[in-house]
Amino acid sequence: MSASSRSTLVAAVVGLLLLGGLVVFATSLPDGDAASSEQDAAAGPIDLPDELPGGLLALDGDDLPEELTAQLTDLDQLQGQEDSAGARLTEVFGVPSAFRIYAAVDQSSVAQVTAVDKAPGVFLPDFPPIDPELIELTRPAVELVDAGDALCVVTWGQAVPAGQEVDETAPPQSLRCQQGAGERTYEIFGQGMTVDAAVEALDALVSA
């Protein structure tokens, strides 16, 4: 990935990830229960880690490498948007919630992580998961992937016609993966990440 595309990737974090992933996440959980809000909120705030597997660093963390800080012109604005997102989810669902944005030092990947103290709901893609063979494709542009304890919606950007080989080394254009841990739901919405990398990050969050 070129330096310019990496810079564009980090610059897009606050826009694309915040507006895209968070809205989808909010629609994939059951509605909040006002009657249980006070009891659930007593569990306290959710603390997301400063670092995730794959070298993903929280962009609001202390002592960020210069390679990342050079791309972030307004850390206060980023922190404010993260706090606002977490507060809005807490308001909607009536339970502790957290939101944080991460990036690799080489700026090759970025990820939005959301956590809500509510059991996962139905994880629905924005498309019908049709067998690609029925529509003469080797791989559709978007697919629903069962990744063990996690479910992912993977966007490749372009369908692969039937008869053509799939480039297994190319990462998806973007992905959204969700995993539950008891009464808590974790979700990653990222770019420049493989499904395996997203699942590894989710496993680390669940086991933390």
Image: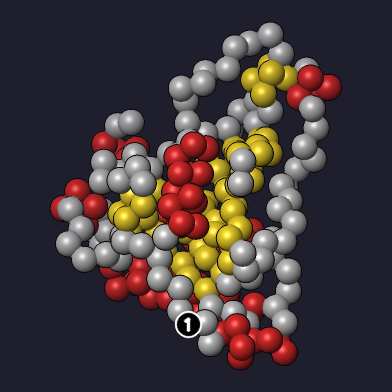
Which residue is located at x 56 percent, y 85 percent?
Answer: 41
- Amino acid found under the numbered disc labelled 1: Gly
Q: Position of residue 122 (x, y in %)?
A: 75, 56
Q: Position of residue 77 (x, y in %)?
A: 34, 72
User: Which residue appears farthest toward the right when viewing the image?
Assistant: 134
Q: Secondary structure at mark 1?
A: loop
Q: What colouring does the structure picture have?
A: secondary structure
Q: Position of residue 188 (x, y in %)?
A: 51, 53
Above or below for 174 versus 111: above
Which residue is located at x 61 percent, y 88 percent?
Answer: 39
Q: Position of residue 153 (x, y in %)?
A: 63, 43
According to the picture, the residue beneath numbered tag 1 turns out to be 44
Please indicate, yes or no, whether residue 29 appears anywhere in the rendered image: yes
Q: Is residue 142 left or right of residue 11?
A: right
Front-most of residues 17 and 117: 117
Classify the position of the N terminus by image quarter: top left
Which residue is located at x 20 percent, y 58 percent?
Answer: 64
Front-most of residues 98 and 43: 43
Q: Is residue 11 left or right of residue 116?
A: left
Q: Quadrant of residue 59?
A: bottom left
Classify the position of the C terminus by image quarter: bottom left
User: Which residue appears farthest toward the top when viewing the image?
Assistant: 163
Q: Is residue 22 left or right of residue 112?
A: right
Which residue is located at x 52 percent, y 18 percent?
Answer: 167
